[in-house]
Image (cartoon, grey):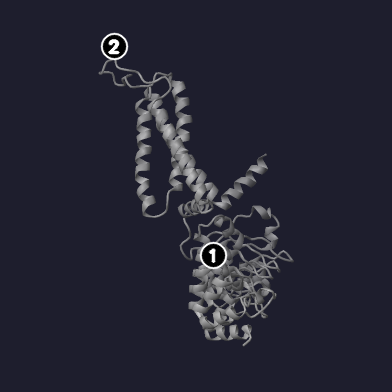
Amino acid sequence: MNPLILLKNAAQNGDVNKLYQAIAKDSNVLEHYDKTSFAETPLHIATSRGHINFALEIMRLKPSLSKKLDEQGWSPMHVALQHNQTSMVHRLIETDPTLVGVKGREGFTPLHYVVQNDGVNLLREFLAVSPHSVIDTTNKGKTALHIAAEKGNTRALEALLSFLGRSWYREALYWEEKVVNWKDENGFTVLHVAVTMNDIQIILHCITIRLYNRPNFIGSFTVLDIVDRANNNPDMKDVLIQAGAKHSDVMKTYDINAIPSMKQVSFEPKPTLLDNVIRFLKGQKTNISTETHDALLVVAALVATATFQAVLSPPGGLRQADSSDSDSLPFSKVGKVVMKEWLYITFLILNSTSFWVTIITIYLLLLNGFYGQLSTLPLILFSITYLFCSTIISPSLICAIVNFSFFICCVVLLSSGLVVISNHSLLSYIRKLWSRCR
């Protein structure tokens, strides 16, 4: 029997033994499908019929077939979804998470397909294994949000918005704003689509996130203009006005790029400021390789040790007890640094800056989970010990106060810095304000 026919029969029946019989007859039988641009491969057949073991065996032998499109423009993952082979889909993404983002006909990915068909459980799983797939667009420039709004799939839209609001992969904060304001080939954002579909539930979801009153397409119409011209829905109009939407004639009096976001409408819990900070820090951490992580941890530990030792043995040493010292003095000079106050303050600021930055770096590099949390306690105690040591050896009460004040300033500045850099909208506003002041 022809090896290709034998292979096709094996795929239809999920027979792994016949698969190897075909390979035994022609060791390059799977290469045949690589030579053609489009073909219904054995993997397409197996996924459509739910033959999981056979499909995984093909993927192991010939991984490239998992992304091959058939004559209809669909990958094996698309085919599995079309035939409701949910177990197959789970195993495919376990084997290769990148299959979530394979583009088929008209740029549709498996993620777009589950959004279109309101497969919320699969959608959440797809986003978990392949978070960057949320930014994929079709040939018409539509994101998964556009598709959910067009189909009126409120649950899918809610899942997407919740993911964008709470995900912590690198640059998640940037893409949260970028995706929700993405324009398709007609210049429509997801909010414009919801208005044209006259779907108030979708609109209520949309206005809980950063959506702007920008004139997005030909004619410079805002979403409020569309309501007036298309359906004139009073309830929808009230919701949009309450959220801060404006007509285009009002918008012309403002700098479009300076328009603030709509007021937040409480629909479901929004990420807090702390959530955004944590998302930013985790996003930065995920982009570091294991080798770089280990090297940074070693360097940080060495710097922390050196700066702590510098406090224990400061330049010039410490004053030693002698007969002239009096224990009745409120602030004894015994055990204090020899250097002058202004020199000590300068030394303390420079050394403490290095120490606190290093401690924070170590904390951010700690492992997630139980062992990371366990390591946090000695790190905190180590930091408190440094603070007490640097205070005890201070030559005067003023220096001790400066030491504590500097510690508080470091905490405040660090917290403020994290808030600013983790809030994309605030950071953009500061940059625009700075450019105008220059």
Instruction: State the residue in front, 34 or 2.
Output: 2
Mark 1 or mark 2, earlier in chain: 1
How far apart in space, not on screen, are marks 1 and 2 (Cα)? 72 Å
Q: Nearer the viewer, residue 353 or 43?
A: 43
Dividing the picture into quarters, in which one does residue 105 lie? Answer: bottom right
To which quarter of the image does residue 148 belong? bottom right
Above or below 35: residue 317: above
Q: Which mark is residue 120?
A: none
Q: Residue furthest right?
A: 219
In the picture of the structure, the residue carrying the numbered disc 1 is: 130
Q: Is residue 315 left or right of residue 256?
A: left
Dots 1 and 2: beta carbons under 8 Å?
no
* Residue depicted at x 55% and y 79%: 20
Q: Looking at the picture, how far across and down is residue 18, in whole percent? A: 54, 83
Secondary structure beneath label 1: loop
Is residue 50 something that shows in the picture?
no
- Split into 4 quadrants, where in the image is the C terminus? top right
Taking the view exactly as shown, the residue that stands out farthest to the front is 25
Side of 162 where 178 appears, left or right: right
Residue 411 locus on image (x, y percent) = 44, 40
| Residue occupying the far left of the picture | 328
- Does residue 222 sit above or below 412 in this rendering? below
Q: Give the crowd class for mark 2: few <14, some 14-19, many >=20 residues within 10 Å.
A: few
For image coordinates 54% across by 47% down, the residue present is 420
The answer to whether residue 337 is visible is yes
Q: Disc 2 on helix, strand or loop?
A: loop
Crowding at dot 1, Cα within 10 Å, few <14 / some 14-19 / many 20+, comes out as some
Q: Residue furthest top?
A: 324
Read off the residue under disc 2.
324
For the N terminus, the quadrant is bottom right
Front position among marks 1 and 2: 1
Q: Indicate the amino acid at tag 2.
A: Ser
